[in-house]
Amino acid sequence: MMKIYGEAAGLQKHEGFTELSSIAISLSPEAMEKFATFVIQAASEMKRMGTGYDHSHFMDFCKDWNPTWPDIQLTQVYEDA
């Protein structure tokens, strides 16, 4: 089980995406373990690729992906806050 909730930030910087001031990811223990593994693997890939790394999708990583889950993308930082 996975759901994501968030609050919009005051100023939107990216067309097509909403910048959030906070998020809450609601996960079952099993989904949390899969997500933790995904984050670790994405970090390794980002280090390996350097500036060539763009993003990774949790839905592409998770073999038993449930289509009702929201997709999570991990991206490199494109601008300073």
Image: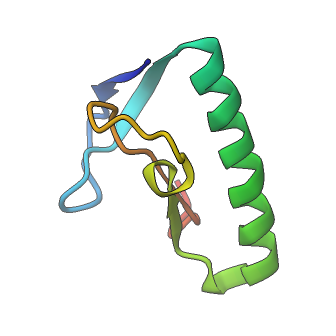
Q: Quadrant of residue 3?
A: top left
Q: Is residue 21 left or right of residue 11?
A: right
Which residue lies most toward the bottom here? 52
Q: Is residue 43 left or right of residue 69?
A: right
Q: Residue at x 64, y 14 (%)?
A: 29
Q: Position of residue 38 (x, y in %)?
A: 66, 47
Which residue lies most toward the left here? 16
Q: Position of residue 40 (x, y in %)?
A: 77, 49
Q: Quadrant of residue 23?
A: top left
Q: Residue at x 53, y 75 (%)?
A: 54
Q: Quadrant of residue 42?
A: bottom right
Q: Considering only vertical position in the picture, is 43 above or below 4?
A: below
Q: Residue at x 50, y 49 (%)?
A: 58
Which residue lies most toward the front here? 64
The colour scheme applied to this rendered structure is rainbow
Nearest the viewer among 61 and 41 is 61
